[in-house]
C-alpha cells in the first residue's frame, strides 16, 4: 500500500512559493501532520493522530502507524510489520 510519502504543506495566504508547496522535514513535518488529515487528488484521505496511529480511507479504511524518524516519514501498514 503506501510505503512512503513525501510530505508537503500547501501555503495559504501571505507569500506563496511558485508551486504553492513547501517540502517539510523533522519537527516541521511532525507538526504539520500530527492531528491533521491529508486529502489526496483521487479523493482518498489519510489522518495522522498524535499517538502515531494513521488511517487511510479510499472507500476502504486501512489502519496503520506513522512517525517521523529524523527527516523521514515512516509508516507501517498491517499485515506487514516492516516500517518503510
Image (cartoon, rainbow, N blue to C red):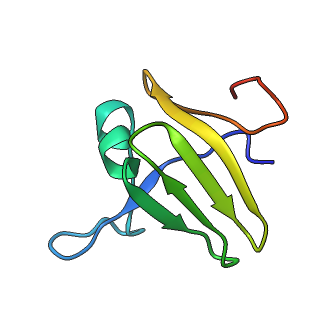
Is 19 situated above or below 43?
Answer: above
Is 20 situated above or below 68?
Answer: below
Q: Is residue 81 left or right of residue 43?
A: right
Q: Where does the image place residue 5, in percent across and percent down from the top left? A: 61, 46
- Classify residue 12 by image quadrant: bottom left
Q: Where does the image place residue 59, in percent across and percent down from the top left? A: 76, 74
Quadrant of the image containing the C terminus: top right
Query: At x 44% / y 48%, what residue is drawn?
Result: 49
Q: Is residue 74 left or right of residue 61?
A: left
Q: Where does the image place residue 34, in percent across and percent down from the top left? A: 37, 47
Residue farthest along the left direction in this orientation: 14
- Classify residue 80 by image quadrant: top right
Is 27 situated above or below 7?
Answer: above
Residue farthest along the right direction in this orientation: 79
Q: State how many labels appear.
A: 0
Query: At x 19% / y 76%, what residue is drawn?
Result: 13
Of residues 7 and 23, the one nearer the viewer is: 7
Query: At x 79% / y 67%, what residue is drawn?
Result: 60
Q: Where does the image place residue 77, in percent across and percent down from the top left? A: 74, 39
Amino acid at each position: 500500500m503506501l510505503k512512503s510519502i513525501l510530505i508537503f504543506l500547501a501555503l495559504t495566504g501571505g507569500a506563496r512559493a511558485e508551486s504553492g508547496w513547501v517540502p517539510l522535514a523533522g519537527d516541521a513535518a511532525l507538526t504539520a501532520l500530527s492531528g491533521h488529515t491529508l486529502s489526496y487528488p483521487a479523493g482518498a484521505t489519510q489522518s495522522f493522530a498524535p499517538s502515531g496511529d494513521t488511517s487511510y480511507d479510499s472507500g476502504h479504511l486501512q489502519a496503520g502507524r506513522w512517525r517521523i524518524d529524523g527527516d523521514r516519514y515512516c509508516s507501517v501498514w498491517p499485515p506487514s510489520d516492516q516500517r518503510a
